[in-house]
Image (tube, coloured by chain):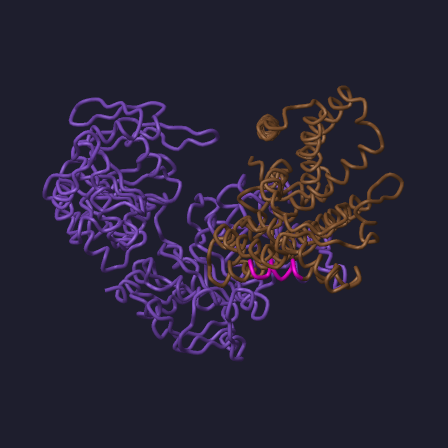
Amino acid sequence: MLELHNISKSFPGAKALDGVSVRFEPGEIHALVGENGAGKSTLLKIITGLYQPDSGEIFFNGKPLQFRSYRDSLQAGIDIVHQEIQVIPESTVAESIMINNLTAFGHGGIIVWKRLYAAARAYMNMVDLIIPPDTLVKSLSPAQKRLTQIARALAGQAKVILLDEPTGALTEHESGNLFRVLRGLREQGVTLVFVSHKFEEVFSLCDRATVLRDGRYIGTHPIAELTPGSLIAMMIGRVFTDPHLGKVNVNQERIVMSVDNVTSHGRIHEASFDLHEGEILGFYGLVGAGRSELARVLIGDLPMDAGRLLVNGKAATIRNIGDSLYRYRIGYVTENRKEEGLFLRDTVRTNISVAVWPSLRHWLTRYINHKAEDQVCHDTVRSLSIKTPGLNQTVDNLSGGNQQKISVGKWLAADCDILIIDEPTIGVDVGAKDQIHHLIRDLAQIKRKAVILISSDMPEIIKLANRILVFRGGRIAGEVQDVDNPKKGYPDISADIGKFLR
Amino acid sequence: MSKDGKEARALEKRTVITGRTIGLMTAALILFGAIALVSSTFLSSYTMFVLSRQIAFFTLIAMAQAVCLVVGGMNLSVGAIGSMCTVVLGLSLSNAGLDGWIAVPLTLLCGAIAGLANGMLIVKLRIDSFIVTLSMMFIFMGLRSGISGGQPYPVPTSFGIVGQRGFMGIPYVFMVMLAVLAVMSYMYRNTVFGRRMLATGGNADAARLSGINNNNMIIGANVLSGLLAALAAVLWTSELGSAAPETGDSWLIVTFAVAIIGGTGLKGGVISPYGIFMGGIIYTLIRHGLIEMKANPYYMNVYIGVLILLTIAIDRLRERYDER
């Protein structure tokens, strides 16, 4: 049994954890839920010795633990499967699983492969990973890599395994397999701590749930006593009575984009929908279900193999993002803000104005009009209330919320009529999240843009959208209308969405 | 705060002189003062003339490397393009008897085409710039040896004016370099093409998602690199008074050394043309100082290596100190 007592941890300027106490029992799958910034990651890092708590104690089977490093936690039998899949691409599956005890299979530093493979296979069987042990890790699917990591934890004789959003890059089917493996481990008395944002997973898999909010412990309850509504209420600190930001005023007369049977092989199959002026159309589904893929097909980042696309009533051919931006005024705010949304080492100015440079240059001298550029940037900073000391600030130094506003701001500066916003509040703190929600709403309602909102955060999508397309297995599985109807509550709409996910 | 971020901001603040350039200037001044103290001939106008020609030359070939580094690539064939262009220049001036006004543009075109070939291969075959330009280095070097047979071509005396003469003690070569620096600086600071190349080098994925065609940026940078290498080859031929096929053989290492001393980011996205100019000055002074001190010529490269490391180490330390 793993027990945390009064754990506190502060970082400069923020209290990440404030007196958190939890007990994780053997043979249970224990969900750890909370909003971004609630302290889940910090807690996992303290349990695995990556951070040292400022105060508080950890007991494992009654004995106090003091970890100085991840190695200490491995030795004690506690391992973690990280959110980002961490593997060594050029090694074999067997090596990856046995990485912490490779020396046990050798004579004087030379590995006896046969013995290594045999030992690895035992653990691979435990997680249903039925492939040759000498397969190279780089050729595995994300799901198989996940299983490899879990097998590694088992090979290290882990009695406690922490899983941080383990279904991240997995398809629904693969997630199902993973859950079967996890249930098997539960039978063997392993303690599984499961961090997830996905309520379906928490409710179908876990035995108990602990909620954190703003670094504080809110409570631990058996899943059977919880409903999605009560769980959300614990997470956000108030009862979820008012799920909407209000009725979305859609101009049904003006269809700005019409998608007709669009197919991209292996990604999206025969997707059709219309998008109207002033609309906020939600794309809901699991990762890999086709939401982001469809978005990337629409902006020309992925190939469109069949189907038709109309923008403002005219047939549109979009071969690359240059086309989508400069010819059709479609902007795409990526979900991977840091990796592909921003030039982190560059200034606020460059990040906002990058897409408008061509329109600011002199035809002969090619000189970018810096005054006009600064004007655009200042306007954007003001209208989105971006907190920055100035346009010369390096974006890396801003908070997640402000960074997100900048990646949206880039497309506003470029005067896009259609905005596709992918997971707008990932890694954004609670306050900024609300601001971004109002920003998205104002885009549609005041600036009369058409917005496609992609999110796996159900409360978020219900709060903002007037219509939700539910994606499943590369298809649009169904459409939930009338989402912004004030008479409908969160449970009604989430039930409607849920119907299409089964 | 990252040093790269700082450099980027400096470029955007539209200041020519950055904190880093000031650091490099100080280093150059110290070197200059030290050599002036040791040597009696150093401050003569003749030495200054010769050294400023070297500075111009090193700065130009380093720019040819830096433009590729900016987009996150490199050009290992920069010297090979220089050699091949020298042969093209020699052929058109002596064998074909063309006028300089035709031969030089032809040579520059040849350099641009060589760069275009590099760029197209990198982009179309999606092969790393290291591999492409390494292979192309062999091809260009083979072409220059095959065509020339290793023999230098004579060029008309009049062709030497730009390389050998100057105005008011300043070599024409140096003026050409200053013009190139000004154009580069303008391009990276004020034009869409320049800023997009910086964006591609800074974060290629973000650039793509901002509507930038990264392939065009990579091709453009390589064409520019070939063009600059060809220009350096022309100037060198003019200075030497003959078109020597082995012209570019020693360039490669120098281009990296000068570009890095000048603060060009090896990961892309960062360039300071005036920093590279300072790099050219420092590299030239190090070499010259060693000659003045009568350092053992066989060990010359050891000293150069140590001094380059020292320069960069001091510069990085200064930067870390600045960050506090």
Furthest residue toward top:
B37
Could you tell me residue B304's position as x and y percent? Answer: 61, 30
Which residue is the extreme one toward the left?
A188
Q: Residue at x 35, y 71 (%)?
A: A265
Work out whether residue A354 can be spotted.
no
Q: Quadrant of the C terminus of chain A?
A: bottom left
- Measured from the top left, where is residue A98 in percent x and y? 20, 39
Q: Colour of chain A?
A: purple
Vertical relation: A100 (above or below) A450: above
Horizontal side of residue A23 vs A282, given as left or right: left
Relative placement, left or right, of A384 versus A21 is right
Pick the quarter of the image with the N terminus of chain A.
Answer: top left
Q: Is residue B114 magenta?
A: yes
Looking at the image, which residue is at 47% across and 62% down?
A: B125
Q: Position of residue A455 (x, y in %)?
A: 39, 57
* x then y, percent, for residue B168: 89, 40
Q: Is residue A363 left or right of residue A73?
A: right
Q: Which residues are magenta?
A: B110-118
- Majority secondary structure of the magenta segment? helix
| Quadrant of residue A80 within the rendered picture | top left
**Would you place residue A88 above or below residue A330 in this image?**
above
Identify by letter the chain in brown. Answer: B
Asked whether A371 or B3 is in front, the reply is B3
The foreground one among A276 and A297 is: A297
Q: Residue furthest right?
A: B168
Q: How many marks?
A: 0
Q: Is residue B13 magenta?
A: no
Q: Is residue B127 visible?
A: yes
Residue toward you, A104 or B34: B34
Give the residue displayed 71% in from the left and 58% down from the top: B89
